[in-house]
Amino acid sequence: MTSQADATPLLKGQNNDAGQPSPAAPRWLADRAVTANVVAFALNFAVVGASNFGLWGKTNKDVSDSIPTLTTPAAYAFSIWGLIFTSETALVVWQALPRNAGNLAVKQGLGPWFAAACVLQAVWSIAFAQEALTLSAVILVGIAVCLGKASANLAGFRARGAAWFDHLILHAPIGLHAGWTCAAALVNINLAAAQTSGVAAQVTAAIVTVFAAAAAAAVYGVVLLDPAFLAAVVWALAAIVANDGGYRDALLGKEVARGLTGAITVIWVGLLALQVVAVAARRLRK
């Protein structure tokens, strides 16, 4: 097992193994996991930012608007990316600070999963801009799995009573990103279905993906103590209900469309209520 001393870079004036003085090194360069997080996040930030200007092809909005689906959320839903990138910028800076050397929540919680998710998201941006929707859906599921794994790893720290600041700087950004990519995978899969399949396949994709996202949100929010994950999925489902572009009515007819919209409403309201009850129950047990 690596000790604290092993994980900390040599200070200026200390001797290395060859007996020669070693210059001080920033922790984020000396710690491979921290370095991977910094570099991968910077790559993701740059590539995703460039996609907003159409550098890789169509913008995300252009692609989404060109292919209506049964689960396309209202435009406001995507504003969550501002919160995700802002909070993760703070996380990446925080985990690179010298005082966090050897932080087990960073090493065992984030592991390689956060860096892998950032790299995959950069690749996804290019694939999505090129309208390779089936490929981008597969990549997005991979992103959700990586971030979901990071959140699951952090669940043990939450169960032992992580400090409020740790929740704010570490757990919430990862949970929010994980939950949103879970919901975004839902949307991407439905985009791929709308691009290549008929009505039956689109309806099946909508039902399966909505229930899968809701099930994941329930598990993470209640069992793995990650309310940020559940909140992101609820945000997405509520935005799907709010999108009254008319595609559901045109494809399914008003009565069936109303039934689908009602079912999604019941699901997101039920998830929210479940989270409130779960939080209240944990507080009563303390």
Image (cartoon, grey):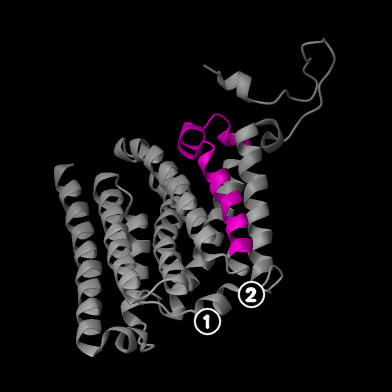
Residue at image position (25%, 78%) is: 261
**Is residue 116 shown in magenta?**
yes
The answer to which of 55 and 239 lies nearer the viewer is 55
Residue at image position (29%, 62%) is: 208
Q: Residue 49: where, in percent of width, then height?
A: 65, 66
| Furthest-right residue in this view | 20
Left or right: 203 as drawn, with respect to 33: left
Which disc number belongs to residue 58?
Answer: 2
Is 236 located above or below residue 161 in the figure? below
Q: What amino acid type is highlighted by mark number 2?
A: Lys
Is 230 located above or below residue 93 in the figure? below
Q: What amino acid type is highlighted by mark number 1?
A: Ser
Q: Which residues are magenta?
A: 98-127
Give residue 197's quadrant in the image.
Answer: bottom left
Between the C-alphas of marks 2 and 1, the distance is 10 Å
Confirm whether residue 97 shows in the render: no
Q: Which residue is mark 1?
A: 66
Q: Give the main secondary structure, helix, strand or loop, of the magenta stretch.
A: helix
Please say if the residues under marks 2 and 1 sit with CB atoms less than 8 Å apart: yes
